[in-house]
Image (tube, rainbow, N blue to C red):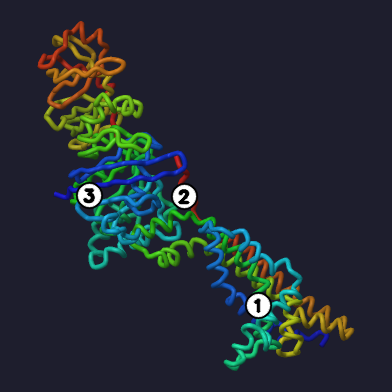
């Protein structure tokens, strides 16, 4: 193991994090937009609930997912009847990564939409755009910077996800063993050198993801501030 | 004939209440008043952007809101071309794409509407420009162009010149007037500038603290006793529209619409035929009972007193010098000259007190 690049494990880790990010994208954008644009009762409660997976013990998040997607879970039974098995497959790792990355993603989206002057959307409406088209052609592109940044954060978070993943996906070498799980199992086996090698790979991936996120923020000029009110 | 406009609206926002009722056959409606008087809020009502009590809105015979029929068109169905105080050009689109965003609504007429907007507002050279690379005046023109390209049923212009400095206003106003005259479009024109109100509109509604305090022909309304304190506070003066006849030696000869010749200062040369709007404060207009002899003032016009109207701090003397002008004199001066309607007088105007407006 030592000295060899754990190519399969890296590929799985990247795939899990990428699919999890894509999975979280629509709800994160929808929720972020709703929270940024609407003031409603219980808004703070929703915000707090959304943040929970970020602060709960990841193991608890994993248990929650297990209750939902396990064979006797709320959704697991339904999915099983469709022939889809989640628990102890890489899908479960995707779900775990999506769950823990979602709070970062949704919050970034909320901030991104909050920075977009709602009057642009109103202008689009007066020019004949339906609410959906005004969202898609004005607010969404104007919030792009923050949304992509949120996606990169969620992706980076997914790369390192361990606790929830270990519970729902288990550690099945070749199938669900991502880098984080791999490090844990190497330590369990007393393979310190192997653990160090995987740590190095983890470190490199995480650094790369965060670097891309920071570079993106810098490259994308913030949207033009509307002329100050005179 | 595009008249038949009627608006009834009530909006309460905190301790501000807009409560207006308007009815007019005029095509170009000026909403005039100080800031905070509710002009922009009224536009928002027309646009359907303002939640509030159900308004009743009919523009040029077309109903947008009719509480009796439970009709209330959605924002995107109203077909209005809105140019807000801040142009709100979409920052992620270039000028051409901003214009196309508007033109999308025009449907089959999109090509024509777009071409016309580009032509009237001379937007051709700007098309590839990013909107953050536009000057203030260019931004205003593009915002107006986007509204026009949408082939609107009416134009709503919210202080389109307010954010521009004077030289820029002089460049943008002609475009606005061109739009006004090129199309038979109903226009709502919001302004707090009495000069603009007199130049742009055929009918004005004066708003103050959420209420309509006067309506009618702009000159008559703005100089009326009821509105005068408000319009004077906002800089009311005589507005004279004229064309350049000749120019030289720091002064230009201009001719007003009614054929009156005036001498005006021209620090920079003016092209012959150029249209000018000149401002002349009522307090700077001198009246003489007899023709003055040698005098430094370059403009002495024979005129006739039309009527006298007392104001709080003097008397407004309306005279007909070919153009209708208003002089503000002290009561003492009116007595000394024994001014009365019908009496011939001479208007004495220093070239230097004629200020070039937008």
Where does label 1 land, which residue?
A: A17
Give me the residue at 83% from left, 78% from top.
Answer: A196
Tell me, yes or no, if residue A76 can be seen here.
yes
* Res B265 seen here: no
In the rendered structure, the residue with mark 1 lies on which chain? Answer: A
Asked if labels 3 and 2 touch by Cβ distance under 8 angstroms, the answer is no
10 Å crowding of disc 2: few (<14), some (14-19), many (20+): some
What is the CA distance from the residue labelled 1 to the residue labelled 2? 37 Å
x and y percent of residue A107 in the render? 61, 63
Quickly name the residue at label 2: A226
Residue on which the image places disc 3:
B186
Q: Residue at x 58, y 76 (%)?
A: A22
Element type at marker 3? loop
Q: Are marks 1 and 2 in contact (CB under 8 Å)?
A: no
Disc nearest the viewer among 3 and 1: 3
The answer to whether residue A70 is left or right of residue B56 is: right
**Horizontal placement of A93 versus B243: left or right?**
right
Q: Quadrant of residue A179?
A: bottom right
Q: CA distance from mark 3 to mark 1?
A: 56 Å
Quadrant containing the C terminus of chain B in the rendered view: top left
Residue B316 disc label: none
Q: Residues within 10 Å of mark 3 (few under 14, many from 20)?
A: many
Residue drawn at 71 percent across, 69 percent down: A207
Query: Left or right of B219: which side holds A174?
Result: right
């Amino acid at each position: 193991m030592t000295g060899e690049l754990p190519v399969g494990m890296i590929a799985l880790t990247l795939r899990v994090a990428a699919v999890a990010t894509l999975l979280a994208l629509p709800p994160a954008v929808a929720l972020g937009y709703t929270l940024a644009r609407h003031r409603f009762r219980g808004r703070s409660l929703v915000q707090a609930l959304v943040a929970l997976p970020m602060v709960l013990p990841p193991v608890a998040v994993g248990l929650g997912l297990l209750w939902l997607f396990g064979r006797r879970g709320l959704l697991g039974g339904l999915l099983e009847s469709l022939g889809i098995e989640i628990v102890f497959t890489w899908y479960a790792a995707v779900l775990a990564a999506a769950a823990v990355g979602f709070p970062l993603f949704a919050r970034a989206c909320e901030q991104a939409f909050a920075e977009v002057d709602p009057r642009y959307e109103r202008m689009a409406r007066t020019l004949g755009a339906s609410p959906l088209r005004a969202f898609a052609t004005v607010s969404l592109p104007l919030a792009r910077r923050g949304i992509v940044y949120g996606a990169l954060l969620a992706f980076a978070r997914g790369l390192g996800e361990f606790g929830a993943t270990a519970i729902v996906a288990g550690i099945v070498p070749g199938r669900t063993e991502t880098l984080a799980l791999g490090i844990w199992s190497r330590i369990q086996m007393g393979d310190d050198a192997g653990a160090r090698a995987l740590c190095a790979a983890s470190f490199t991936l995480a650094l790369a993801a965060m670097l891309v996120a920071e570079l993106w923020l810098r490259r994308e000029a913030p949207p033009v501030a509307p002329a100050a009110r005179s | 004939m595009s008249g038949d406009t009627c608006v009834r609206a009530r909006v309460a926002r905190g301790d501000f209440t807009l409560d207006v009722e308007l009815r007019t056959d005029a095509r170009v409606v000026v909403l005039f008043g100080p800031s905070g008087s509710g002009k922009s809020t009224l536009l928002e009502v027309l646009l359907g952007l303002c939640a509030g009590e159900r308004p009743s809105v009919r523009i040029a015979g077309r109903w947008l809101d009719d509480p009796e029929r439970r009709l209330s068109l959605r924002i995107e169905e109203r077909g209005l071309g809105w140019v807000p105080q801040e142009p709100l050009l979409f920052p992620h689109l270039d000028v051409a794409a901003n214009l196309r965003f508007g033109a999308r609504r025009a449907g089959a007429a999109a090509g024509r509407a777009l071409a016309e907007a580009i032509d009237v507002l001379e937007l051709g050279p700007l098309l590839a420009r990013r909107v953050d690379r536009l000057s203030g005046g260019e931004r205003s023109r593009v915002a107006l162009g986007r509204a026009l390209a949408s082939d609107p049923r009416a134009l709503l212009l919210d202080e389109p010149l307010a954010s521009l400095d004077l030289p820029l206003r002089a460049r943008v106003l002609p475009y606005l007037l061109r739009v006004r005259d090129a199309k038979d479009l109903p226009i709502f024109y919001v302004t707090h500038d009495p000069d603009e109100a007199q130049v742009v509109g055929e009918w004005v509604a004066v708003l103050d603290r959420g209420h309509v305090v006067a309506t009618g022909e702009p000159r008559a309304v703005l100089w009326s006793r009821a509105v005068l304190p408000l319009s004077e506070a906002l800089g009311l003066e005589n507005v004279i529209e004229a064309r350049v006849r000749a120019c030289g030696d720091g002064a230009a000869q201009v001719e007003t619409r009614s054929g009156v010749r005036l001498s005006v200062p021209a620090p920079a040369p003016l092209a012959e035929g150029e249209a000018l709007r000149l401002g002349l404060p009522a307090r700077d207009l001198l009246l003489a009972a007899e023709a003055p002899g040698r005098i430094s003032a370059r403009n002495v016009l024979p005129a006739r007193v039309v009527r006298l109207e007392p104001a709080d701090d003097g008397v407004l003397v309306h005279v007909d010098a070919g153009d209708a002008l208003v002089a503000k004199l002290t009561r003492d001066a009116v007595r000394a000259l024994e001014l009365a309607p019908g009496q011939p007088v001479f208007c004495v105007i220093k070239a230097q007190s004629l200020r070039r407006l937008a």
